[in-house]
Amino acid sequence: MKELLRTRPDLAAQQVDLGRRWDHLHFALSDRRRNEPGEEDDSLAGIAIRGEAEIAPHVVAGQGVPLRYTRPETVERIARMLEAMRFDALREHFTFANLREAGVYKRPREDGIEEAWQWLRENFVLFRAFHVTAAEHGDGVLVRVD
């Protein structure tokens, strides 16, 4: 571990925290999440947000949600998808009515949609950079939704 930190001193800072807005980004990124709420989302966007596979049933976050892992090969595919995405084109879907209809977790108030979108735009840039960096290093990703 010490050798790894010597060659990659920024490794400890390689994380993205979407807080309670993880489902906002899931909704924006995933056509399946927008159009098939409640269905399992195994799209690349869904995997980027929720992780690829449970580590083990007993490995859970604070609220009891299982931690998940995404393999380096999949991280590479996610990074390329995020790089190619025209995020601003997804704004048309991010409306209060659409978020309410899809049952988005912790959706913003109707008068807070524009502010929520701006936050999402800024954090999408961080989310994309995180995955691109991980892909460049051949890293897998640990995902915690809690």
Image (cartoon, helix red, strand yellow):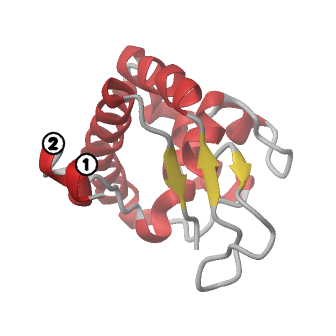
Question: Which residue is rendered at x = 30% and y = 57% of the image?
Answer: 1
Q: In this rendered view, identify the residue nearer to me: 75 or 119.
A: 75
**For the residues marked 1 and 2, what is the alpha-carbon distance in whole angstroms?**
5 Å
Q: Position of residue 66 (x, y in %)?
A: 71, 68
Q: In this rendered view, identify the residue nearer to me: 36 or 100.
A: 36
Question: Which residue is rendered at x = 30% and y = 43% of the image?
Answer: 121
Question: Which residue is rendered at x = 61% and y = 50% of the image?
Answer: 69
Q: What mark, if any, has residue 129 been given in the picture?
A: none
Q: Is residue 65 left or right of residue 134?
A: right
Question: Which residue is rendered at x = 81% and y = 39% of the image?
Answer: 36
Disc 1 target residue: 4
Q: Is residue 103 left or right of residue 93?
A: right
Disc 2 target residue: 7
Find numbered disc 2 in the image and state the secondary structure of the residue it sits on.
Answer: helix
**Residue count near mark 2 (Cα–Cα under 10 Å), binned few <14, some 14–19, many ≥20:** few
Position of the C terminus, as image quadrant, is bottom right
**Residue count near mark 1 (Cα–Cα under 10 Å), binned few <14, some 14–19, many ≥20:** few
Find numbered disc 1 in the image and state the secondary structure of the residue it sits on.
Answer: helix
Within the image, what quadrant is residue 93 found in?
top right
Reply above or below: 44 against 46: above
Q: Amino acid at mark 2?
A: Thr
